[in-house]
Amino acid sequence: MAFEIPTAEDLGLYLGLDEIDGDRAALLIQQAVNLCLSVVKPLPDEATAVVLSVCGRAYTNPQQISYETIGPMSVQRPTGSGGLYLTKADKAALKSLAGRGGAFTVDPTPSTADPSPTWPIDDVGFPDEFEPGWGYS
């Protein structure tokens, strides 16, 4: 099964909105897919969650407002919580979903390696005389 790009309706359901601007949502979804493709190609089937998360941040806070006061109510949002971007967690999730990342082992031994020794073997054995300095008399 190949990755299916989420729809504007999927984004509305993800955000819990009854109505959503379809053109704006479609643009954000396409841009989010492009950002995700900059990390992993092709996108894994499960990347929909990351795409919707990226779109959700951008759709709900496009101007990256961090503090807002209306009458007696005030809201403070984390810095960098708006706009269209991938977080470090988004990138890690994409890599993990694609089967990349984590610990791995690389065996540098070629598949044609032969376990037999490569140095010359003396079938006769040791000579009777050793060179001076080897500790044999």
Image (tube, rainbow, N blue to C red):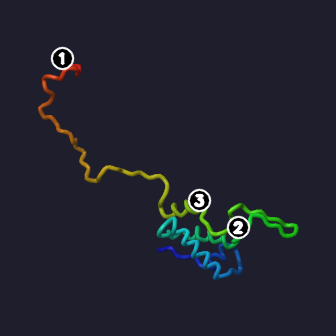
Compare marks 1 and 3 and give the one earlier in the sequence.
3
Q: Which residue is drawn at 65% across and 79% down?
A: 24
Callout 1 amino acid? Ser
Compare marks 2 and 3 and give the one earlier in the sequence.
2
Drawn side of residue 30 relative to residue 19, left or right:
left
Q: How far apart are marks 1 and 3 (CA)?
A: 69 Å
Assign the C terminus to one quadrant of the image: top left
Compare marks 2 and 1 and give the one earlier in the sequence.
2
Percent coordinates x, y for residue 30 in the rendering: 57, 76
Badge 3, how many Cα within 10 Å: few under 14, some, many 20+?
Answer: few
Q: How far apart are marks 2 and 3 (CA)?
A: 18 Å
Callout 3 amino acid? Lys
Callout 2 amino acid? Gln
Quarter location, residue 70 = bottom right
Mark 2 or 1, closer to the camera = 2
Quarter location, residue 130 = top left
Percent coordinates x, y for residue 59 in the rendering: 67, 73
Percent coordinates x, y for residue 10 in the rendering: 62, 77
Q: Which residue is drawn at 28% across and 53% down?
A: 111
Q: Which residue is drawn at 11% across and 32% down?
A: 124
In the displayed orientation, state which residue is furthest to the top: 137
Drawn side of residue 116 relative to residue 4, left or right:
left
Badge 2, how many Cα within 10 Å: few under 14, some, many 20+?
Answer: some
Q: Name the residue under label 1.
A: 137
Q: Looking at the picture, does residue 104 appear above or below residue 124?
A: below
Q: Looking at the picture, does residue 19 appear above or below residue 77?
A: below
Q: Which residue is drawn at 78% across and 64% down?
A: 67
Q: Name the residue under label 2.
A: 64
Q: Residue 88 carries which label?
A: 3
Drawn side of residue 41 relative to residue 16, left or right:
left
Percent coordinates x, y for residue 13 in the rendering: 66, 76
What secondary structure is found at the residue carrying circle 1? loop
